[in-house]
Amino acid sequence: MPIYSYKGVSQAGKSLKGTTSAENIRAARARMRVEGVFLTQIKEEEAASETSGQSSQRSRFQFELPKRIPPLQLSVATRQLATLSSAGIPLVECLGALVEQIEHSTLKTVFSQIRDKVNEGSALADAMAGSGKFDSLYISMVRSGEASGALGTVLTRVADYLEDQVRLSSKLTSIFVYPAVLLGFAVLVVAMLVTVVLPQITNLLLSLGQELPFYTRMVIGASDFARSWWWVMLIGLALLTAGFRAFKATESGRLIVDRTVLRLPAVGRVVRVVAIARFSRTLSSLLAGGVGIIQSLDISRHVARNAVIENAIEDAKTSVLEGASLAHPLRASGEFPPMVITMVEVGERAGDLEAMLAKVAETYDEQVETTVTRLTSLLEPLLILVMVGIVLFIMMATLMPLMSVTSSLQ
């Protein structure tokens, strides 16, 4: 359905602007009149012209392109919607005010369509599910909030969850930025030495007519190979990347890769802690929002993003369906640390499982930050030493023969 942006004046004389969806511009004008808006300008946002078959096909293609909504923008919008809903404002008016405040174009269009569907009588969760921009966790919690009559409270929990996820992702990204930049600079320096500087010195060394040391011949051979066959190296790297992605796309391949990652000396612990923290926080938020334990386990299983952890949670869901406790199958899987099992057992006995899971998530978030910061502090000097060692090796391989010739001439 086309989206129209409009400007107008309300019955009270206040200037208004926003977006609405309708079958055509005439229907959009009629809808604005019903809502009490006197239009001064209205135009279609989508650059589509149905009078031309080619342009219509192109506009449909553009409309079908997936547009990703940044998690930070979604968390801010959810927080605003929770605040408006908690104030006792009708849902349609909340969505209308939210659309006016959102600056992200894709998110603005999505909530505009949701507002129109809710105005037509649809439930908020169903309208969000129809947009295709919200995950199952978001939709399940909104549906639970609508059913319990505590939509504002549930939306606040969703906003807290999204902000925690954004905060964790930002920490991990910021921690890895400096080592990545340093490694990229090291690769660039070595590439410049091998492909630009070294060939100029190589011609001089070969013109001397003396036998070169083994390491010098090795560096010269590597330089010649890189300059002559760089395209083969790029194609090989692309093929390896595509093959790895195709292998990981299979169920067995993803299981092998994720199990291997968990067994890595330092990285495996970080990956496991991050997966358990995401699972614990998601399960806690769903249970606190009134979602059933089975559905909560099914949703939070995918948030872990590790096939080994996901299989353990799936087995736990099956055991819970059979009447067992949650802690027992988690302990039997061997993938969860004893602290998590103990907290889950205490939470089940006290009837406050969501609070215990929230504490597990907070504890593991702190562990992730501490562990990754420590690894980064060790990785930075190691990368510097590796870069300096490679540069020194190349310099010695080229300068030593020159120094030897200079000594013989003297």
Image: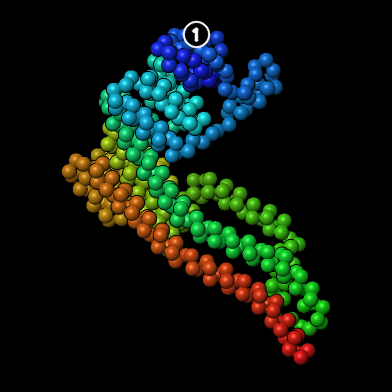
Q: Position of residue 21 (x, y in %)?
A: 50, 18
What is the basis of the colouring in this image?
A: rainbow
The N terminus appears in which quarter of the rendering? top right
Q: Nearer the viewer, residue 178 or 372?
A: 178
Q: Quadrant of residue 128?
A: top left
Q: Position of residue 388 (x, y in %)?
A: 57, 71
Q: Work out whether 259 lies above or below 196.
A: above
Q: Nearer the viewer, residue 403 or 205?
A: 403
Residue most extreme to the left: 350
- Residue at 29% across, 41% down: 284
- Looking at the image, can residue 19 be seen? yes
Q: Work out whether 243 lies above or below 112.
A: below
Q: Position of residue 72 (x, y in %)?
A: 43, 39
Q: Nearer the viewer, residue 31 or 264?
A: 31
- Residue at 37% across, 55% down: 368
Q: Position of residue 266 (x, y in %)?
A: 42, 62
Q: Work out whether 56 lies above or below 222.
A: above
Residue most extreme to the front: 13
Which residue is identified by label 1?
A: 30
Q: In the displayed structure, does residue 265 sit left or right of residue 220? A: left
Q: Secondary structure at mark 1?
A: helix
Q: In the displayed structure, does residue 192 sit left or right of residue 128? A: right
- Looking at the image, can residue 128 be seen? no
Q: Quadrant of residue 203?
A: bottom right
The C terminus appears in which quarter of the rendering? bottom right
User: Crowding near pointer 1: few (<14 within 10 Å), some, many (20+)?
Assistant: few
Q: Nearer the viewer, residue 6 or 331?
A: 6
Q: Quadrant of residue 394?
A: bottom right
- Residue at 63% across, 64% down: 189
Q: Amino acid at mark 1?
A: Ala
Q: How many marks can you see?
A: 1
